[in-house]
Image (tube, rainbow, N blue to C red):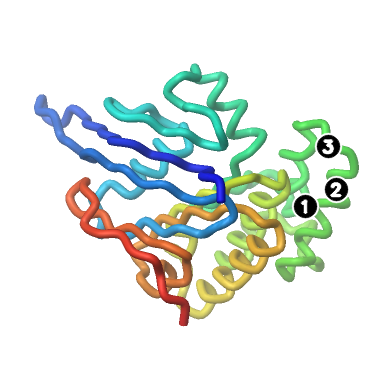
Amino acid sequence: MSKILNVQHLGKSYLSGGKSLTVLDDISFEVASGTSYAIVGPSGSGKTTLLGLCAGLDTPDTGTVALCGSHLTELDEDGRASLRNKKVGFIFQNFQLLPTLSALENVSVPLELRGTKGAANTARTLLEKVGLGDRTHHYPSQLSGGEQQRVALARAFANRPEILFADEPTGNLDEETGERVVELLFNLNKEAGTTLIIVTHDLNLARRCDGLMRLKGGRIFNSETASHP
């Protein structure tokens, strides 16, 4: 099975109060195409920073990231943006929907920007899959948190990404709503054959993945193959 993500000896530091603060130290791991992988750890362990580096949203100080067959460190900012646009999907804790667009428009606009034909029909089909077929013309402010995250799910899968990065996808949801969103996420992912990388502090969610890595203080604490319930 081919490796869609290959991270080797990754390091990242930031200046804080005039001092260098190491956020990630010598991180190495691989993720096979079509699998799911969780990155877990407490707040401040470097999870979100690592996700940003893996997705090419930021650049490391040391080490390399190969994503979808491209070495991110060899691409400039435009090259990384182009790769993300073509092959990567995102789901964020705070949904990041455009408030002035309806649910349908939030899902269809990224498709229209890529010149995809039938964008509205594709968006409508995806919204129906996540149970929002009757809320297509509602704006984010008219939707609950769970509904907004379901719109975000539909948007993330609209471009048929090869890999999907989810940063605390249930972090702003109550337990019951979060479980429903997780079910939809894994079902859509299985149907699309997408690789799924989840950053979470929720071990129950992490253990649903094919593999997981624990971060502590910017280093790998341990990694394991998850056992599914």
With respect to residue 132, does 217 lie above or below?
above
Looking at the rendered structure, which numbered label has been put on residue 120?
Answer: 2
Residue contact at pointers 1 and 2, CB within 8 angstroms: yes
| Residue 98 position by quadrant | top right
Q: Would you name the residue on which mark 1 appears?
A: 104
Look at discs 1 and 2 and give the one toward the viewer: 2
Q: Is residue 213 visible?
A: yes
Residue 13 is left or right of residue 105, and the answer is left
> Image point 51% across, 72% down: which residue?
178
- Secondary structure at badge 3 equals loop
Indicate the position of residue 85 as horizontal and vertical percent values.
64, 33
Residue contact at pointers 1 and 3, CB within 8 angstroms: no
- Secondary structure at badge 1 equals helix
Residue nearer the viewer, 126 or 213: 213
* Residue neighbourhood size for the residue with mark 2, other residues' Cα within 10 Å, grouped as few (<14), some (14–19), many (≥20): some
Q: Would you name the residue on which mark 3 appears?
A: 116
Indicate the position of residue 113 as horizontal and vertical percent values.
76, 32
- Secondary structure at badge 2 equals helix
Look at discs 1 and 3 and give the one toward the viewer: 3
Residue contact at pointers 3 and 2, CB within 8 angstroms: no
Three-letter code for the amino acid on which mark 3 is drawn? Thr
Indicate the position of residue 191 as horizontal and vertical percent values.
71, 63
